[in-house]
Image (spheres, grey):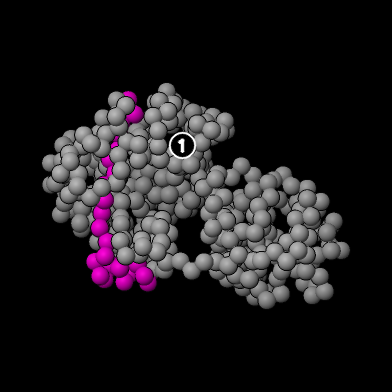
């Protein structure tokens, strides 16, 4: 651990580029006292002991054991009064919003970054009185637990369509928490619970509802009664809950409904042996596990190389970018070809207009989902209207 000189501003910098860290220490040591780490967890351990004398935190987006946004979010909770800077390469707009809104990042610098540009940014933050963005109080796992106690939650269904002919091919089951959603977004609510046992409690409650409703799903969708269910990494790696996932799949199959699980890419690491082992067990049982929000993290291709996933669901910002951003468009076209060669399904969510539909169909996307095609509705609403009003008009 570096020694800290109290006479100069103390800057904690985390980056896996040793050459950049060495250049920063060598060039800027006369102006600032740099404490540098290549390991994000080690940096958090240091910060826990030195938060009162730290003036700025700088983190690279890509690090070996924790991504920069997750690191900055944790550092924001640990030391909310310290400015935070993110060094990023090609970051998606979703990740950028997450950095700004959840990690409360003061400044984002695009890499590669020169030492001179870095010094200028540091000076501006430290010398111009930039107000530190406080981490806003958000939902907590306790709030979610209390909502479960009140039975203040229910499911909705968002229809999924084949890209080839826009015919119905299933639905995604989504959770809604009406009271909490008056203050927070549902993504925030789930995020607050994803590493807490309450996510397992919520999941088991939702599964019980779906088992009871399975005959209605089958009557409504017939042979297309294929349900996608969101899953957290915490749940996948909890032994008792993992067994529940298998039993739930079997119970739904006996009732004529097929279930697949979706887990967000940002929760997945390609070297997580426990996750890979459980994903393999699901695959061996014929249970599909898909990577959700594909393209929003930093290890998309490494995850595909593990060959334990049945398919991917493209991140909605990436899908939206196919119409406006050359790199997003090229990536989607290329990854569709890769998945086709690997025998993986590839679906896209966030479909907002017919132009996106036509482009993705050309690229070979197999499944589509979004407000243009069908909005999330309760099972009762869907039963009343049937599927026709939910289908795209073109």
* Quadrant (top left, top right, bottom left, bottom right) of the N terminus: bottom right
In the image, residue 340 above or below residue 44? above
Image point 17% across, 49% down: which residue? 380
**Is 30 colored magenta in this rendering?**
no
Please report the bounds of the magenta region as a residue range: 142-164
- Residue 282 appearing in the image: no
Q: Is residue 210 visible?
A: yes
Viewer-nearest residue: 266 or 216:
216
Residue 94, image x and y in percent?
51, 47
For label 1, the residue is 319
Q: Is residue 86 left or right of residue 388?
A: right
The answer to whether 146 appears left or right of 72 in the picture is left
Is residue 67 depicted above or below 78 in this figure? above
Say few, some or many: other residues with alpha carbon within 10 Å of mark 1 (under 14 / 14 to 19 / 20 or more): many
User: Which quadrant of the structure image shows residue 363?
Assistant: top left
Instruction: State the residue at coordinates (50%, 45%).
Output: 296
Residue 163 magenta-drawn? yes
Q: Residue at the location (65% across, 59% down)? A: 106
Q: In x, y percent, where is residue 86?
A: 64, 54
């Amino acid at each position: 651990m570096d020694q800290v000189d109290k006479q100069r501003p103390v800057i904690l910098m985390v980056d896996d580029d040793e050459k950049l860290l060495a250049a920063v220490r060598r060039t800027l040591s006369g102006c600032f006292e740099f404490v540098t780490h290549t390991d994000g967890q080690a940096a958090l351990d240091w910060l826990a002991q030195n938060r009162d004398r730290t003036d700025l935190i700088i983190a690279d987006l890509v690090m070996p054991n924790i991504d920069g946004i997750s690191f900055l979010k944790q550092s924001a909770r640990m030391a909310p009064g310290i400015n935070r800077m993110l060094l990023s390469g090609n970051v998606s707009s979703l990740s950028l919003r997450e950095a700004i809104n959840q990690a409360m990042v003061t400044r984002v610098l695009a890499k590669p970054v020169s030492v001179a540009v870095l010094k200028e940014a540091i000076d501006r933050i430290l010398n111009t009185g930039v107000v530190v963005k406080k981490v806003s109080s958000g939902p907590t796992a306790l709030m979610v637990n209390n909502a479960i106690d009140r039975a203040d939650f229910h499911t909705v269904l968002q229809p999924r369509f084949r890209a080839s002919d826009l015919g119905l091919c299933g639905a995604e089951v989504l959770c809604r928490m009406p009271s909490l959603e008056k203050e927070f977004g549902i993504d925030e609510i789930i995020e607050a619970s994803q590493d807490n046992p309450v996510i397992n409690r919520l999941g088991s409650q939702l599964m019980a509802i779906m088992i009871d409703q399975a005959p209605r799903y089958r009557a409504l969708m017939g042979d297309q009664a294929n349900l996608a269910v969101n899953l957290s990494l915490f749940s996948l790696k909890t032994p008792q809950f993992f067994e529940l996932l298998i039993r739930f799949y079997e119970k739904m199959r006996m009732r004529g409904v097929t279930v697949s699980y979706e887990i967000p890419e940002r929760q997945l690491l390609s070297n997580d042996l426990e996750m890979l082992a459980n994903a393999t067990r699901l695959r061996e049982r014929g249970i599909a596990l898909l990577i959700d929000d594909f393209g929003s993290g930093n290890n998309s291709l490494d995850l595909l190389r593990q060959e334990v996933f049945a398919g991917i669901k493209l991140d909605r910002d990436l899908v939206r970018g196919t119409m406006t951003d050359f790199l997003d468009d090229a990536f989607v076209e290329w990854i569709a070809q890769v998945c086709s060669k690997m025998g993986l399904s590839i679906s896209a969510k966030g479909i907002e207009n017919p132009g996106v539909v036509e482009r993705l169909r050309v690229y070979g996307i197999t499944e589509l989902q979004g407000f243009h095609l069908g909005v999330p509705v309760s099972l009762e609403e869907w039963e009343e209207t049937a599927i026709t009003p939910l289908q795209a008009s073109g």
